[in-house]
Amino acid sequence: MRSGADGPGPTCLGAAYAAGLATGVWNDLDELESHWRKDAEWTPGMEASVRDREYRNWRKAVEKSFGWVADGDG
């Protein structure tokens, strides 16, 4: 798992950047990067033991939902 995020990554903005590069809006990555500024940075603050416990609880809840609706009911 990544421990932080500070760029557009695989988002709509990232897709727009890729499209702009592909269609010639920007000549190269250097030109594109000159227009980009970091707006915010996210760094997780949850302790690993808490995160792991919550993830286990989430998985347990998801597993309990299996078979909730019988075939043909929904």
Image (tube, grey):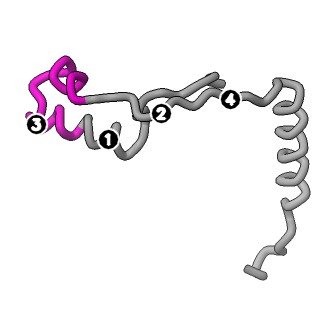
In which image quadrant can residue 23 be found? top left
Q: Are marks 4 and 2 in contact (CB under 8 Å)?
A: no
The alpha-carbon separation of the residues under discs 2 and 3 comes to 25 Å
- Measuring 82% from the left and 32% from the top, which residue is drawn there? 51
The answer to which of 36 and 13 lies nearer the viewer is 36
Q: Earlier in the sequence, mark 4 or mark 3?
A: 3
Residue type, numbered disc 4: Pro
> Amino acid under label 1?
Ala
Between the C-alphas of marks 4 and 3, the distance is 35 Å
Tell me which amino acid carries mark 3.
Val
Mark 3 neighbour density, 10 Å: few (under 14) some (14–19) many (20 or more)? few
Label 4: state its secondary structure.
Answer: loop
Cα–Cα gap, marks 2 and 1: 19 Å
Disc 3 target residue: 25
Classify mark 2: residues with Cα within 10 Å, few (<14), some (14-19) or many (20+). Answer: few
Is mark 2 in CB contact (under 8 Å) with mark 1? Answer: no
Foreground: disc 2 or disc 3 = 2
Q: Residue furthest bottom?
A: 73
- The range drawn in magenta is 19-35
**Secondary structure category for the residue under label 3:** loop
Say whether residue 50 is left or right of residue 39: right
Residue corresponding to mark 4: 44
Q: Using the rendered view, name the quadrant where residue 64 is placed.
A: bottom right
Labels 1, 4: front one: 4
Disc 1, SS: helix
At 84% from the left edge and 45% from the top edge, which residue is drawn? 59
Instruction: Give the CA distance from mark 1 to mark 4.
Output: 25 Å
Quadrant, the C terminus: bottom right
2, above or below 9, in the image: above
